[in-house]
Image (cartoon, rainbow, N blue to C red):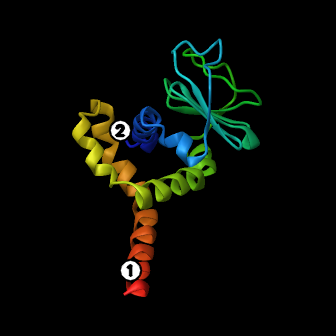
Amino acid sequence: MNQNPLIVQFWLWGLDAQQSLLQTYGFCKFERPSNAGKKSSVYSKNALHLHANGLWLETEHLLYHRGTERFYHSGNMYFAPEPPRLERIAFGSGFEKLESLILEYERWQLSTFKPREDQLEKSPPIGVRQAWQAWKHFLEPSTMIVQYNQIRYNLEIT
């Protein structure tokens, strides 16, 4: 079973992009780069750039390539479908640099919209179904904080 929570996160970002939720959150939508292959836009917010083929965290010179499920050191945006010929970074080290950005987005998403489990009804690909538990485990502390804050908010109002 795949333990990469980014498999699920990219699928969810794709669903959110279809509903313009990435833009609601503050991402700007740009036309796809010429080397990207897939006819998918790039969504950028501050130093984070998302594309169907991966992501680039500009400030960290961090590239995640979805096809290889690996992180690379890159000073440039790279969204080609082919694996890059760049220095690889250990998955844990790369993921650690993204963690807070993903958690911040998911806190916003959870506090604004329905729970993500509702999106499982959209028949996700098998890779997403296999990685769902890893993604949920990654989010558990964040989810509890949001739920706690919601309960505390409700108690303060009543």
Q: Amino acid at mark 2?
A: Asn
Question: Position of 2 compared to 24: left or right?
Answer: left
Q: Amino acid at mark 1?
A: Asn
- The location of residue 85, given as percent across then percent down, is 67, 19
x, y (%) of residue 100? 59, 56
Determine the image quadrant of residue 23: top right
Where 134 sits versus 83, above or below?
below
Left or right, residue 69 beside residue 118: right
Which residue lies under the disc numbered 2? 2
Residue at screen point 52% across, 15% down: 39
The image position of residue 111, as x and y in percent, is 43, 61
Residue under numbered circle 1 = 154
**Which of the image's four quarters has the N terminus?**
top left
Q: CA distance from mark 2 to mark 1?
A: 37 Å
If you read the primary sequence from the N terminus, does the residue marked by circle 2 or circle 1 appear first? 2
Instruction: Judge whether 9 appears above or below 101 on screen.
Output: above
For label 2, count other residues whose C-alpha is less than 10 Å away and answer few (under 14), some (14-19) or many (20+).
few
What secondary structure is marked by label 2? loop
In the image, residue 27 sits, relative to residue 53, either above or below, namely below
Asked whether disc 2 touches disc 1, contact meaning CB atoms under 8 Å apart, the reply is: no
The residue drawn where x is 32% and y is 32% is 127
Q: Which mark is residue 113?
A: none
Q: For this view, does 39 lie left or right of residue 115?
A: right
Is 77 or 42 nearer to us in this picture?
42
Badge 1 element = helix
Residue 55 in percent (x, y) is at 59, 33
Q: Nearer the viewer, mark 2 or mark 1?
A: 1
Q: Nearer the viewer, residue 19 or 144?
A: 19
Answer with the quarter of the image where residue 65 lies.
Answer: top right
Count of numbered circles in the view:
2
Q: Residue furthest front?
A: 158
Crowding at label 1, few (<14), some or many (≥20) Cα neighbours within 10 Å? few
